[in-house]
Amino acid sequence: MFYRYQDWMHGLHNFNDKVLLSIFLCIFIRNSVQDHVSVGRVHSILQKTTHVPYPKETEFLHAYLHFEALTHHDYAFSCLKCGHHPPVVVMDLHKKGVFNMAVSDISEPPETFNGEVNSEEFWETLSMERIATGLLRIGDTNPYTLKPNYENWAPWIGRHTRRSPSLINTEWKKVQTTNTLDNIAEIDMTEERLSDELMNLKVADIRKLCKACGVGTEGSKTDLLSRLRKEMQNRTAYDKIFQKVWGASGGWAAILCPCGIVYSVKFLLRAESPRDFTDMLFSWKHIPNICIYDFARGLATHSNLRRPEAMPFTPFEGRLAESTENNITAAESGTLTISLPWIKEKKMDEDDNCHPVTGSSEHYALSDKFHEANSKDKRDTLRKIQIVPELAGRVNTQAAEQLFAGMRKNNYFLNMMSPTTHMFLVRNILHLQNKEKNGSMLSKIQKNLGHPKTTINLQTDLFGRLVVENRAPEMTRLHLIKPSKACWGKPLTRSQRKLMAQVHSANADDEVALVGSIVIKQKDLITLTNLCEVEGNVLNSCFCVLQQIALSQNVDIYPVDSHTIVTWLPPICAHPMDHLPRNCSEPVSRDMDRILF
Protein backbone atom coordinates (compact mmCIF):
# COMPACT_ATOMS: atom_id res chain seq x y z
CA MET A 1 0.00 0.00 0.00
CA PHE A 2 1.33 3.44 -0.95
CA TYR A 3 1.65 5.63 2.13
CA ARG A 4 2.61 9.31 2.27
CA TYR A 5 3.54 10.95 5.55
CA GLN A 6 2.11 14.47 5.77
CA ASP A 7 1.74 15.87 9.27
CA TRP A 8 2.66 19.49 9.83
CA MET A 9 1.70 19.21 13.49
CA HIS A 10 5.02 17.44 14.03
CA GLY A 11 6.88 20.35 12.40
CA LEU A 12 7.80 18.53 9.17
CA HIS A 13 6.91 19.10 5.54
CA ASN A 14 7.15 16.07 3.25
CA PHE A 15 8.08 16.95 -0.31
CA ASN A 16 8.45 13.61 -2.12
CA ASP A 17 8.83 10.93 0.59
CA LYS A 18 12.61 11.42 0.32
CA VAL A 19 13.13 15.09 1.06
CA LEU A 20 11.52 16.33 4.29
CA LEU A 21 11.94 19.92 5.43
CA SER A 22 11.29 21.22 8.90
CA ILE A 23 8.64 23.94 9.07
CA PHE A 24 11.25 26.17 10.71
CA LEU A 25 13.52 25.74 7.67
CA CYS A 26 10.63 26.55 5.31
CA ILE A 27 9.89 29.77 7.20
CA PHE A 28 13.61 30.56 7.24
CA ILE A 29 13.78 30.19 3.44
CA ARG A 30 10.66 32.35 3.03
CA ASN A 31 12.16 35.17 5.09
CA SER A 32 15.47 34.82 3.22
CA VAL A 33 13.69 35.26 -0.12
CA GLN A 34 11.92 38.34 1.27
CA ASP A 35 15.40 39.74 2.01
CA HIS A 36 16.55 39.04 -1.58
CA VAL A 37 18.50 35.87 -0.79
CA SER A 38 17.83 33.10 -3.29
CA VAL A 39 16.87 29.57 -2.28
CA GLY A 40 20.07 28.37 -3.95
CA ARG A 41 22.20 30.58 -1.72
CA VAL A 42 20.37 29.36 1.38
CA HIS A 43 21.05 25.80 0.21
CA SER A 44 24.77 26.56 -0.23
CA ILE A 45 25.09 28.33 3.13
CA LEU A 46 23.38 25.52 5.06
CA GLN A 47 25.51 22.87 3.37
CA LYS A 48 28.75 24.71 4.15
CA THR A 49 27.68 25.40 7.73
CA THR A 50 26.55 21.87 8.64
CA HIS A 51 29.14 19.99 6.53
CA VAL A 52 26.32 17.66 5.54
CA PRO A 53 25.40 16.96 1.89
CA TYR A 54 21.98 18.36 1.01
CA PRO A 55 19.66 17.33 -1.83
CA LYS A 56 20.32 18.89 -5.22
CA GLU A 57 19.69 22.62 -5.42
CA THR A 58 16.80 22.17 -7.90
CA GLU A 59 15.10 19.61 -5.67
CA PHE A 60 15.61 21.89 -2.67
CA LEU A 61 13.91 24.76 -4.55
CA HIS A 62 10.97 22.60 -5.61
CA ALA A 63 10.55 21.41 -2.01
CA TYR A 64 10.23 25.00 -0.79
CA LEU A 65 7.79 25.94 -3.59
CA HIS A 66 5.81 22.80 -2.71
CA PHE A 67 5.51 24.14 0.84
CA GLU A 68 4.28 27.55 -0.36
CA ALA A 69 1.77 25.95 -2.73
CA LEU A 70 0.25 23.93 0.13
CA THR A 71 0.22 26.91 2.50
CA HIS A 72 -3.12 28.70 2.73
CA HIS A 73 -2.39 32.14 1.25
CA ASP A 74 -5.44 34.29 0.55
CA TYR A 75 -3.59 36.52 -1.96
CA ALA A 76 -6.07 39.27 -1.12
CA PHE A 77 -3.95 42.06 -2.68
CA SER A 78 -5.80 44.82 -0.84
CA CYS A 79 -4.79 47.76 1.39
CA LEU A 80 -6.29 48.29 4.84
CA LYS A 81 -6.28 52.05 4.33
CA CYS A 82 -7.48 52.30 0.72
CA GLY A 83 -9.83 49.29 0.79
CA HIS A 84 -10.80 47.00 -2.07
CA HIS A 85 -11.46 49.88 -4.46
CA PRO A 86 -8.77 52.59 -4.17
CA PRO A 87 -9.79 55.89 -5.81
CA VAL A 88 -6.14 56.73 -6.61
CA VAL A 89 -3.67 54.25 -8.11
CA VAL A 90 -0.12 54.27 -9.46
CA MET A 91 0.79 52.10 -12.44
CA ASP A 92 4.15 51.12 -13.89
CA LEU A 93 6.14 48.32 -15.52
CA HIS A 94 8.98 46.29 -13.99
CA LYS A 95 10.73 45.79 -17.31
CA LYS A 96 13.75 43.96 -15.85
CA GLY A 97 11.64 41.19 -14.32
CA VAL A 98 11.55 38.71 -17.23
CA PHE A 99 11.67 34.99 -17.91
CA ASN A 100 13.13 33.07 -20.84
CA MET A 101 10.60 32.41 -23.55
CA ALA A 102 10.66 31.89 -27.30
CA VAL A 103 8.15 34.32 -28.78
CA SER A 104 8.09 32.36 -32.03
CA ASP A 105 6.62 29.36 -30.18
CA ILE A 106 3.50 31.32 -29.18
CA SER A 107 0.71 30.87 -31.68
CA GLU A 108 -2.22 33.20 -32.13
CA PRO A 109 -5.38 32.24 -30.22
CA PRO A 110 -8.40 30.75 -32.00
CA GLU A 111 -10.85 33.13 -33.66
CA THR A 112 -13.48 32.31 -31.02
CA PHE A 113 -11.28 33.63 -28.19
CA ASN A 114 -12.81 36.81 -26.72
CA GLY A 115 -9.91 37.80 -24.47
CA GLU A 116 -11.38 36.56 -21.17
CA VAL A 117 -9.45 34.07 -19.03
CA ASN A 118 -10.54 32.42 -15.78
CA SER A 119 -7.84 33.68 -13.42
CA GLU A 120 -8.73 31.32 -10.56
CA GLU A 121 -8.34 28.25 -12.75
CA PHE A 122 -5.12 29.59 -14.28
CA TRP A 123 -3.43 30.35 -10.96
CA GLU A 124 -4.76 27.14 -9.42
CA THR A 125 -3.02 25.26 -12.23
CA LEU A 126 0.23 27.05 -11.41
CA SER A 127 -0.10 25.93 -7.79
CA MET A 128 -0.98 22.38 -8.80
CA GLU A 129 2.14 22.25 -10.97
CA ARG A 130 4.20 22.96 -7.84
CA ILE A 131 2.28 20.36 -5.78
CA ALA A 132 2.42 17.64 -8.42
CA THR A 133 6.21 17.96 -8.55
CA GLY A 134 6.42 16.19 -5.19
CA LEU A 135 4.17 13.32 -6.33
CA LEU A 136 5.82 12.44 -9.64
CA ARG A 137 8.24 9.61 -10.18
CA ILE A 138 11.39 9.95 -12.24
CA GLY A 139 10.50 10.27 -15.91
CA ASP A 140 6.86 11.22 -15.33
CA THR A 141 5.44 14.28 -17.10
CA ASN A 142 3.77 16.89 -14.96
CA PRO A 143 0.14 17.05 -16.18
CA TYR A 144 -0.27 20.64 -14.91
CA THR A 145 2.64 22.15 -16.84
CA LEU A 146 1.63 25.37 -18.61
CA LYS A 147 3.42 26.95 -21.56
CA PRO A 148 3.06 30.66 -22.37
CA ASN A 149 0.10 31.24 -24.65
CA TYR A 150 -2.32 34.06 -25.34
CA GLU A 151 -5.61 32.26 -24.66
CA ASN A 152 -4.70 30.96 -21.20
CA TRP A 153 -2.53 33.59 -19.54
CA ALA A 154 -4.18 35.64 -16.79
CA PRO A 155 -3.12 38.49 -14.49
CA TRP A 156 -3.75 38.32 -10.76
CA ILE A 157 -6.23 40.72 -9.14
CA GLY A 158 -7.58 40.43 -5.58
CA ARG A 159 -10.97 38.70 -5.42
CA HIS A 160 -12.70 41.73 -3.88
CA THR A 161 -11.22 44.17 -6.39
CA ARG A 162 -11.97 42.29 -9.61
CA ARG A 163 -15.45 42.24 -11.14
CA SER A 164 -15.37 38.45 -11.57
CA PRO A 165 -12.90 35.54 -11.80
CA SER A 166 -12.95 36.03 -15.58
CA LEU A 167 -10.29 38.66 -16.35
CA ILE A 168 -9.42 40.40 -19.60
CA ASN A 169 -6.18 39.72 -21.48
CA THR A 170 -6.08 41.01 -25.05
CA GLU A 171 -2.32 40.88 -25.37
CA TRP A 172 -2.48 38.92 -28.62
CA LYS A 173 -3.89 42.02 -30.33
CA LYS A 174 -0.50 43.68 -29.94
CA VAL A 175 0.83 41.44 -32.72
CA GLN A 176 -1.68 42.72 -35.28
CA THR A 177 -0.02 44.38 -38.24
CA THR A 178 -2.77 46.93 -38.93
CA ASN A 179 -1.92 50.30 -37.41
CA THR A 180 -5.20 51.39 -35.89
CA LEU A 181 -5.24 54.55 -33.78
CA ASP A 182 -4.80 52.71 -30.52
CA ASN A 183 -2.00 50.51 -31.88
CA ILE A 184 -0.14 53.57 -33.12
CA ALA A 185 -0.33 55.07 -29.63
CA GLU A 186 1.11 51.85 -28.19
CA ILE A 187 3.99 51.75 -30.69
CA ASP A 188 4.91 55.39 -30.11
CA MET A 189 5.12 54.90 -26.39
CA THR A 190 7.19 51.72 -26.43
CA GLU A 191 9.56 53.08 -29.09
CA GLU A 192 10.44 56.00 -26.83
CA ARG A 193 11.22 53.66 -23.96
CA LEU A 194 13.17 51.28 -26.14
CA SER A 195 15.16 54.15 -27.65
CA ASP A 196 16.15 55.23 -24.15
CA GLU A 197 17.41 51.74 -23.41
CA LEU A 198 19.35 51.62 -26.68
CA MET A 199 21.19 54.78 -25.66
CA ASN A 200 22.57 52.91 -22.63
CA LEU A 201 24.10 50.12 -24.73
CA LYS A 202 27.73 50.04 -25.78
CA VAL A 203 28.61 50.67 -29.43
CA ALA A 204 29.73 47.06 -29.93
CA ASP A 205 26.38 45.74 -28.68
CA ILE A 206 24.49 48.16 -30.92
CA ARG A 207 26.50 46.99 -33.95
CA LYS A 208 25.60 43.35 -33.16
CA LEU A 209 21.95 44.36 -32.87
CA CYS A 210 22.08 46.16 -36.22
CA LYS A 211 23.62 43.10 -37.82
CA ALA A 212 20.90 40.84 -36.37
CA CYS A 213 18.22 43.16 -37.76
CA GLY A 214 19.82 43.43 -41.19
CA VAL A 215 20.76 47.07 -40.73
CA GLY A 216 24.05 48.69 -41.75
CA THR A 217 26.73 48.44 -39.07
CA GLU A 218 29.03 51.26 -40.19
CA GLY A 219 29.09 54.76 -38.75
CA SER A 220 28.91 56.35 -35.32
CA LYS A 221 26.63 55.41 -32.43
CA THR A 222 24.19 58.13 -33.46
CA ASP A 223 24.02 56.74 -37.00
CA LEU A 224 23.38 53.22 -35.72
CA LEU A 225 20.62 54.38 -33.36
CA SER A 226 19.01 56.39 -36.15
CA ARG A 227 18.83 53.30 -38.37
CA LEU A 228 17.41 51.18 -35.57
CA ARG A 229 14.72 53.76 -34.77
CA LYS A 230 13.69 53.76 -38.41
CA GLU A 231 13.67 49.98 -38.45
CA MET A 232 11.51 49.86 -35.32
CA GLN A 233 8.56 51.21 -37.31
CA ASN A 234 8.21 47.64 -38.47
CA ARG A 235 6.56 45.60 -35.73
CA THR A 236 8.56 42.45 -36.44
CA ALA A 237 11.85 44.33 -36.24
CA TYR A 238 10.62 46.06 -33.09
CA ASP A 239 9.98 42.72 -31.37
CA LYS A 240 13.44 41.49 -32.36
CA ILE A 241 15.11 44.60 -30.95
CA PHE A 242 12.98 44.41 -27.82
CA GLN A 243 14.06 40.83 -27.17
CA LYS A 244 17.72 41.73 -27.54
CA VAL A 245 17.51 44.70 -25.17
CA TRP A 246 14.95 43.70 -22.57
CA GLY A 247 14.97 39.93 -22.50
CA ALA A 248 12.47 37.35 -23.62
CA SER A 249 9.20 38.35 -21.95
CA GLY A 250 7.87 41.88 -21.54
CA GLY A 251 8.37 42.19 -17.77
CA TRP A 252 5.44 42.52 -15.41
CA ALA A 253 2.99 45.37 -14.98
CA ALA A 254 1.63 46.36 -11.59
CA ILE A 255 -1.12 48.59 -10.22
CA LEU A 256 -0.58 49.86 -6.67
CA CYS A 257 -2.29 52.20 -4.25
CA PRO A 258 -0.19 55.17 -2.99
CA CYS A 259 0.50 53.17 0.20
CA GLY A 260 2.58 50.73 -1.86
CA ILE A 261 0.17 47.78 -1.72
CA VAL A 262 0.00 45.83 -5.01
CA TYR A 263 -3.55 45.33 -6.30
CA SER A 264 -2.92 43.85 -9.74
CA VAL A 265 0.02 42.18 -11.44
CA LYS A 266 0.22 41.03 -15.05
CA PHE A 267 3.12 39.08 -16.54
CA LEU A 268 3.59 40.24 -20.12
CA LEU A 269 4.48 38.00 -23.02
CA ARG A 270 5.27 40.95 -25.28
CA ALA A 271 6.35 44.57 -25.00
CA GLU A 272 4.34 46.76 -22.63
CA SER A 273 1.66 49.09 -23.92
CA PRO A 274 -1.34 50.94 -22.45
CA ARG A 275 -3.40 47.93 -23.55
CA ASP A 276 -2.02 45.86 -20.67
CA PHE A 277 -3.04 48.37 -17.99
CA THR A 278 -6.39 48.92 -19.68
CA ASP A 279 -7.03 45.17 -19.56
CA MET A 280 -6.48 45.19 -15.81
CA LEU A 281 -8.57 48.32 -15.22
CA PHE A 282 -11.46 46.89 -17.25
CA SER A 283 -11.24 43.77 -15.07
CA TRP A 284 -11.76 45.85 -11.92
CA LYS A 285 -15.18 46.18 -10.37
CA HIS A 286 -14.68 49.96 -10.08
CA ILE A 287 -12.15 51.87 -12.18
CA PRO A 288 -10.16 54.32 -9.98
CA ASN A 289 -10.90 58.02 -10.30
CA ILE A 290 -7.20 58.91 -10.58
CA CYS A 291 -4.73 56.77 -12.55
CA ILE A 292 -1.11 57.94 -12.35
CA TYR A 293 0.92 56.53 -15.25
CA ASP A 294 4.03 57.65 -17.09
CA PHE A 295 2.16 57.52 -20.43
CA ALA A 296 -1.15 58.96 -19.26
CA ARG A 297 -2.19 60.23 -22.69
CA GLY A 298 -1.80 56.77 -24.25
CA LEU A 299 -3.77 55.14 -21.43
CA ALA A 300 -6.71 57.56 -21.75
CA THR A 301 -6.74 57.44 -25.55
CA HIS A 302 -6.55 53.66 -25.75
CA SER A 303 -9.22 53.11 -23.08
CA ASN A 304 -11.65 55.57 -24.69
CA LEU A 305 -11.11 54.01 -28.13
CA ARG A 306 -11.85 50.55 -26.79
CA ARG A 307 -15.05 51.64 -25.09
CA PRO A 308 -16.33 54.70 -26.97
CA GLU A 309 -19.85 54.18 -25.67
CA ALA A 310 -18.71 54.51 -22.04
CA MET A 311 -15.65 56.79 -22.43
CA PRO A 312 -13.83 55.52 -19.29
CA PHE A 313 -11.67 58.64 -18.97
CA THR A 314 -13.86 61.73 -18.83
CA PRO A 315 -14.17 64.69 -18.67
CA PHE A 316 -11.67 66.34 -21.04
CA GLU A 317 -10.28 62.96 -22.18
CA GLY A 318 -8.82 62.37 -18.72
CA ARG A 319 -7.23 65.82 -18.42
CA LEU A 320 -7.95 68.07 -15.46
CA ALA A 321 -9.36 70.93 -17.53
CA GLU A 322 -10.38 71.77 -21.07
CA SER A 323 -7.37 72.07 -23.36
CA THR A 324 -7.65 75.79 -24.07
CA GLU A 325 -4.69 78.12 -24.56
CA ASN A 326 -5.39 79.89 -21.27
CA ASN A 327 -5.53 76.65 -19.29
CA ILE A 328 -2.38 75.29 -20.92
CA THR A 329 -0.49 78.52 -20.23
CA ALA A 330 -1.67 78.56 -16.61
CA ALA A 331 -0.65 74.91 -16.17
CA GLU A 332 2.81 75.57 -17.61
CA SER A 333 3.31 78.55 -15.30
CA GLY A 334 2.06 76.63 -12.27
CA THR A 335 -0.89 78.96 -11.57
CA LEU A 336 -3.68 76.54 -12.55
CA THR A 337 -5.44 74.86 -9.64
CA ILE A 338 -8.20 72.27 -9.98
CA SER A 339 -9.68 71.13 -6.67
CA LEU A 340 -11.15 67.62 -6.38
CA PRO A 341 -12.58 67.59 -2.83
CA TRP A 342 -14.22 64.18 -3.28
CA ILE A 343 -10.74 62.60 -3.09
CA LYS A 344 -10.71 63.44 0.63
CA GLU A 345 -14.41 63.10 1.35
CA LYS A 346 -17.22 61.40 -0.52
CA LYS A 347 -19.68 63.57 -2.42
CA MET A 348 -22.94 64.29 -0.63
CA ASP A 349 -24.83 64.00 -3.94
CA GLU A 350 -23.35 61.01 -5.71
CA ASP A 351 -22.97 60.92 -9.50
CA ASP A 352 -24.50 58.22 -11.65
CA ASN A 353 -22.22 55.18 -12.09
CA CYS A 354 -19.87 56.67 -9.51
CA HIS A 355 -16.95 55.21 -7.62
CA PRO A 356 -18.35 53.88 -4.30
CA VAL A 357 -15.64 55.54 -2.19
CA THR A 358 -15.66 59.04 -3.71
CA GLY A 359 -19.18 59.30 -5.15
CA SER A 360 -17.66 60.78 -8.33
CA SER A 361 -17.91 59.44 -11.88
CA GLU A 362 -14.95 61.51 -13.09
CA HIS A 363 -11.83 59.63 -14.19
CA TYR A 364 -8.46 61.24 -14.86
CA ALA A 365 -5.20 59.90 -16.29
CA LEU A 366 -2.38 61.94 -14.74
CA SER A 367 1.40 61.90 -14.86
CA ASP A 368 3.71 62.46 -11.91
CA LYS A 369 6.40 65.12 -11.75
CA PHE A 370 9.21 62.82 -12.89
CA HIS A 371 7.48 61.81 -16.13
CA GLU A 372 5.92 65.10 -17.22
CA ALA A 373 8.62 65.65 -19.84
CA ASN A 374 7.86 62.30 -21.54
CA SER A 375 5.15 63.87 -23.67
CA LYS A 376 5.68 66.50 -26.34
CA ASP A 377 1.97 67.34 -26.49
CA LYS A 378 1.34 70.67 -24.73
CA ARG A 379 -2.13 69.52 -23.75
CA ASP A 380 -0.54 66.98 -21.43
CA THR A 381 0.50 69.81 -19.11
CA LEU A 382 -3.13 69.55 -17.96
CA ARG A 383 -2.30 66.09 -16.60
CA LYS A 384 0.17 67.36 -13.98
CA ILE A 385 -0.55 66.02 -10.54
CA GLN A 386 0.61 69.31 -8.99
CA ILE A 387 -2.52 71.00 -10.35
CA VAL A 388 -4.68 69.15 -7.80
CA PRO A 389 -4.08 70.42 -4.22
CA GLU A 390 -5.62 67.22 -2.78
CA LEU A 391 -2.91 65.18 -4.56
CA ALA A 392 0.17 67.42 -4.76
CA GLY A 393 2.60 66.51 -2.00
CA ARG A 394 0.09 64.11 -0.44
CA VAL A 395 0.21 61.11 -2.78
CA ASN A 396 3.28 58.93 -3.14
CA THR A 397 3.53 58.78 -6.92
CA GLN A 398 6.78 56.81 -6.69
CA ALA A 399 5.19 53.81 -4.96
CA ALA A 400 5.76 51.60 -8.01
CA GLU A 401 9.37 52.73 -8.45
CA GLN A 402 10.05 51.97 -4.78
CA LEU A 403 8.56 48.50 -5.19
CA PHE A 404 10.64 47.78 -8.29
CA ALA A 405 13.80 49.03 -6.60
CA GLY A 406 13.43 46.19 -4.09
CA MET A 407 12.31 43.61 -6.64
CA ARG A 408 15.32 44.32 -8.86
CA LYS A 409 17.44 42.74 -6.11
CA ASN A 410 15.61 39.46 -6.80
CA ASN A 411 16.09 39.44 -10.57
CA TYR A 412 19.35 37.47 -10.37
CA PHE A 413 17.41 34.34 -9.40
CA LEU A 414 13.83 35.07 -10.54
CA ASN A 415 14.87 35.71 -14.14
CA MET A 416 16.55 32.29 -14.34
CA MET A 417 13.33 30.41 -13.57
CA SER A 418 10.77 28.95 -15.94
CA PRO A 419 7.77 31.20 -16.75
CA THR A 420 5.30 29.50 -14.40
CA THR A 421 7.79 29.19 -11.53
CA HIS A 422 8.74 32.85 -12.00
CA MET A 423 5.08 33.92 -11.86
CA PHE A 424 4.22 31.73 -8.86
CA LEU A 425 7.13 32.98 -6.76
CA VAL A 426 6.73 36.66 -7.72
CA ARG A 427 3.06 36.61 -6.72
CA ASN A 428 4.02 34.94 -3.44
CA ILE A 429 6.71 37.57 -2.73
CA LEU A 430 4.30 40.44 -3.50
CA HIS A 431 1.64 38.89 -1.28
CA LEU A 432 4.01 38.60 1.68
CA GLN A 433 5.17 42.18 1.14
CA ASN A 434 1.54 43.33 1.10
CA LYS A 435 0.90 41.51 4.37
CA GLU A 436 3.96 43.06 5.97
CA LYS A 437 2.96 46.59 4.91
CA ASN A 438 -0.60 46.10 6.11
CA GLY A 439 0.66 44.74 9.41
CA SER A 440 2.99 47.69 9.87
CA MET A 441 0.15 50.08 9.05
CA LEU A 442 -2.14 48.36 11.57
CA SER A 443 0.49 48.53 14.33
CA LYS A 444 1.04 52.23 13.67
CA ILE A 445 -2.70 52.94 13.83
CA GLN A 446 -3.07 51.06 17.11
CA LYS A 447 -0.11 52.92 18.57
CA ASN A 448 -1.43 56.33 17.49
CA LEU A 449 -4.90 55.68 18.86
CA GLY A 450 -3.47 55.21 22.33
CA HIS A 451 -6.68 53.59 23.62
CA PRO A 452 -6.92 50.51 25.79
CA LYS A 453 -7.98 47.49 23.79
CA THR A 454 -11.31 47.45 25.59
CA THR A 455 -12.36 50.84 24.21
CA ILE A 456 -11.62 50.42 20.50
CA ASN A 457 -12.58 47.83 17.95
CA LEU A 458 -10.78 47.85 14.60
CA GLN A 459 -12.88 46.44 11.79
CA THR A 460 -13.10 46.64 8.00
CA ASP A 461 -16.06 48.36 6.40
CA LEU A 462 -18.03 47.33 3.32
CA PHE A 463 -15.20 48.48 1.04
CA GLY A 464 -12.38 46.76 2.95
CA ARG A 465 -11.09 49.91 4.68
CA LEU A 466 -9.97 49.76 8.29
CA VAL A 467 -12.37 51.69 10.55
CA VAL A 468 -12.55 52.24 14.29
CA GLU A 469 -15.74 51.31 16.07
CA ASN A 470 -15.89 53.73 18.98
CA ARG A 471 -17.13 52.37 22.30
CA ALA A 472 -15.97 55.27 24.40
CA PRO A 473 -17.79 58.61 24.61
CA GLU A 474 -14.63 60.53 23.64
CA MET A 475 -12.52 59.44 20.69
CA THR A 476 -10.23 62.46 20.21
CA ARG A 477 -7.16 62.07 22.39
CA LEU A 478 -5.77 65.48 23.32
CA HIS A 479 -2.19 64.26 23.69
CA LEU A 480 -2.21 63.14 20.03
CA ILE A 481 -3.16 66.54 18.57
CA LYS A 482 -0.25 68.22 16.81
CA PRO A 483 0.08 71.63 15.10
CA SER A 484 -0.32 71.41 11.33
CA LYS A 485 -0.61 74.14 8.71
CA ALA A 486 -2.26 71.63 6.39
CA CYS A 487 -5.54 71.86 8.32
CA TRP A 488 -5.89 75.65 7.91
CA GLY A 489 -7.47 75.56 4.49
CA LYS A 490 -9.00 72.12 4.82
CA PRO A 491 -12.78 71.99 4.11
CA LEU A 492 -15.16 70.77 6.79
CA THR A 493 -15.85 67.06 6.94
CA ARG A 494 -19.30 65.64 6.46
CA SER A 495 -19.84 65.17 10.22
CA GLN A 496 -18.69 68.74 10.88
CA ARG A 497 -21.06 70.08 8.26
CA LYS A 498 -23.91 68.18 9.90
CA LEU A 499 -23.08 69.71 13.28
CA MET A 500 -22.96 73.18 11.75
CA ALA A 501 -26.33 72.57 10.09
CA GLN A 502 -27.79 71.65 13.48
CA VAL A 503 -26.38 74.84 15.02
CA HIS A 504 -27.81 77.02 12.26
CA SER A 505 -31.23 75.43 12.62
CA ALA A 506 -31.36 76.12 16.38
CA ASN A 507 -32.91 79.23 17.97
CA ALA A 508 -30.70 82.18 18.92
CA ASP A 509 -30.91 81.53 22.70
CA ASP A 510 -30.55 77.74 22.47
CA GLU A 511 -27.49 76.23 24.21
CA VAL A 512 -25.47 74.39 21.56
CA ALA A 513 -22.16 73.64 23.34
CA LEU A 514 -20.62 73.33 26.79
CA VAL A 515 -16.84 73.74 27.27
CA GLY A 516 -15.89 73.36 30.92
CA SER A 517 -18.18 75.81 32.70
CA ILE A 518 -18.68 78.01 29.61
CA VAL A 519 -22.06 77.74 27.90
CA ILE A 520 -22.16 78.59 24.17
CA LYS A 521 -25.43 79.71 22.64
CA GLN A 522 -26.40 79.72 19.00
CA LYS A 523 -26.18 83.49 18.74
CA ASP A 524 -22.58 83.36 20.05
CA LEU A 525 -21.42 81.24 17.12
CA ILE A 526 -23.06 83.56 14.61
CA THR A 527 -20.42 86.16 15.52
CA LEU A 528 -17.75 83.95 13.90
CA THR A 529 -18.75 85.44 10.55
CA ASN A 530 -17.22 88.76 11.67
CA LEU A 531 -13.76 88.28 13.17
CA CYS A 532 -13.70 91.88 14.48
CA GLU A 533 -16.59 91.20 16.85
CA VAL A 534 -16.24 87.58 17.97
CA GLU A 535 -18.07 86.76 21.18
CA GLY A 536 -15.61 86.45 24.09
CA ASN A 537 -17.16 83.18 25.31
CA VAL A 538 -16.27 81.54 21.99
CA LEU A 539 -12.64 82.63 22.25
CA ASN A 540 -12.45 81.61 25.91
CA SER A 541 -13.78 78.16 25.01
CA CYS A 542 -11.06 77.80 22.38
CA PHE A 543 -8.42 78.91 24.90
CA CYS A 544 -9.76 76.41 27.42
CA VAL A 545 -9.43 73.52 24.94
CA LEU A 546 -5.95 74.66 23.89
CA GLN A 547 -4.90 74.70 27.53
CA GLN A 548 -6.14 71.12 27.97
CA ILE A 549 -4.24 70.03 24.85
CA ALA A 550 -1.05 71.69 26.08
CA LEU A 551 -1.31 70.24 29.59
CA SER A 552 -1.89 66.77 28.16
CA GLN A 553 1.47 67.14 26.38
CA ASN A 554 3.30 68.48 29.47
CA VAL A 555 3.36 72.08 28.26
CA ASP A 556 2.29 74.84 30.68
CA ILE A 557 0.30 77.71 29.20
CA TYR A 558 -1.86 80.41 30.74
CA PRO A 559 -4.98 81.41 28.75
CA VAL A 560 -5.76 85.04 29.46
CA ASP A 561 -9.43 85.99 29.54
CA SER A 562 -10.32 87.39 26.11
CA HIS A 563 -12.37 90.29 27.59
CA THR A 564 -9.31 91.43 29.54
CA ILE A 565 -7.07 91.19 26.47
CA VAL A 566 -9.26 93.38 24.29
CA THR A 567 -9.47 96.21 26.82
CA TRP A 568 -5.95 96.00 28.19
CA LEU A 569 -3.31 94.54 25.78
CA PRO A 570 -0.87 97.31 24.71
CA PRO A 571 0.15 97.56 21.04
CA ILE A 572 3.80 96.55 21.69
CA CYS A 573 5.05 94.21 24.43
CA ALA A 574 8.70 93.99 25.44
CA HIS A 575 8.01 90.72 27.21
CA PRO A 576 4.62 89.05 27.59
CA MET A 577 5.22 88.32 31.28
CA ASP A 578 5.72 92.03 32.04
CA HIS A 579 2.26 92.96 30.77
CA LEU A 580 -0.01 90.28 32.18
CA PRO A 581 -3.17 91.72 33.73
CA ARG A 582 -3.00 91.94 37.52
CA ASN A 583 -6.63 90.90 38.02
CA CYS A 584 -5.99 87.31 36.88
CA SER A 585 -7.64 84.71 39.06
CA GLU A 586 -4.59 82.43 38.96
CA PRO A 587 -1.00 83.24 40.01
CA VAL A 588 1.46 84.03 37.27
CA SER A 589 4.94 82.44 37.13
CA ARG A 590 7.90 83.48 34.98
CA ASP A 591 8.90 79.79 34.73
CA MET A 592 6.04 78.90 32.40
CA ASP A 593 7.06 77.32 29.09
CA ARG A 594 4.69 79.37 26.93
CA ILE A 595 2.12 82.15 27.21
CA LEU A 596 -0.92 81.94 24.94
CA PHE A 597 -3.10 84.99 24.32
Image (spheres, helix red, strand yellow):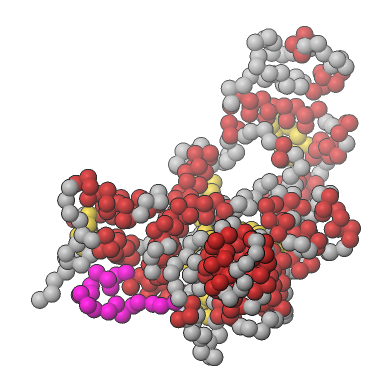
**Residue 575 image point, x, y percent:** 77, 11
Give residue 88's position: percent from left, percent from top: 64, 58
Look at the image and tell me whether residue 126 can be seen: yes
Quadrant housing residue 224: bottom right
**Can residue 274 be seen here?**
no
- From what the image shows, is residue 454 above or below residue 156? above
Magenta includes 145?
yes
Residue 571 higher or lower than 87, as above or below = above
Q: Is 224 left or right of 540, judged from the image as shown?
A: left
Q: Between residues 129 and 511, which one lies in front from this camera angle?
A: 129
Residue lying at 23% horizontally and 74% vertically, measured from the top left: 136
Residue 337 is left or right of residue 414, and the answer is: right
Q: Is residue 167 left or right of residue 380?
A: left
Q: Main secondary structure of the magenta part?
A: loop
- Quarter in which the N terminus is drawn: bottom left
Residue most toward the bottom? 111
Closest to the observer, 44 or 465 = 44
What residue lies at 68% left-to-right and 72% top-to-bottom? 230
Residue 413 at x, y percent in the picture? 39, 58
**In the rendered structure, does residue 56 fall within the stretch colored magenta?**
no
Q: Which residues are magenta?
A: 130-148
Residue displayed at 22% across by 57% down: 21
Q: How many labels, in total?
A: 0
Residue occupying image coordinates x 32% and y 56%: 39
Look at the image and tell me in which quarter the C terminus lies: top right
